[in-house]
Amino acid sequence: MKYLLVLVVVMVAIWIWRSNRAEERSESRRDRPRREAAAVDMVGCDVCGLHCPRQDVIVGRRGMYCCDQHRNQAEQA
């Protein structure tokens, strides 16, 4: 009976400790300011249609492409 009482006390202590930690984590998440994601202009490849950020796209004579292979393929045809 004594061991059962000790086990119950330990379980209650663990439950209280974990619930306090959960409250602290949720409070710190609310206090932390959210960073707004900057919008990025996306353009589609003229060969495959894959959308890439404008700063990563390869500009050719006939359009915009996701890689050199597609630029070469479009300009040879």
Image (cartoon, grey):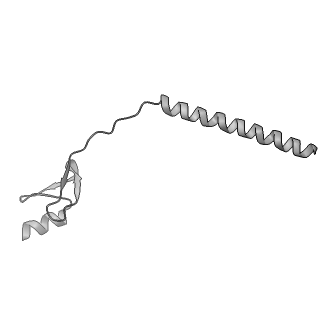
Residue drawn at (60%, 33%), measured in percent from left and top?
23
> Whole-percent x and y of residue 66?
20, 59
> Whole-percent x and y of residue 76?
7, 70
Residue drawn at (55%, 34%), measured in percent from left and top?
26
Name, please, the residue furthest toward the right: 1
Q: Is residue 49 above or below residue 11?
A: below
Q: Quadrant of residue 7?
A: top right
**For this rendering, which residue is in front, 14 or 62?**
14
Q: Quadrant of residue 3?
A: top right
Residue drawn at (76%, 37%), measured in percent from left and top?
13
Q: How many numbered marks appear?
A: 0
Q: Look at the image and tell me in which quarter the C terminus lies.
A: bottom left
Residue drawn at (19%, 65%), measured in percent from left and top?
48
Name, please, the residue furthest toward the bottom: 77
**For this rendering, which residue is in front, 19 or 70?**
19
60 left or right of 42 in image:
left
Q: Is residue 69 above or below residue 60?
A: below
Name, please, the residue furthest toward the top: 31
Name, please, the residue furthest toward the front: 1
28 left or right of 58 in image:
right
Q: Quadrant of residue 24?
A: top right
Q: Look at the image and tell me in which quarter the N terminus lies.
A: top right
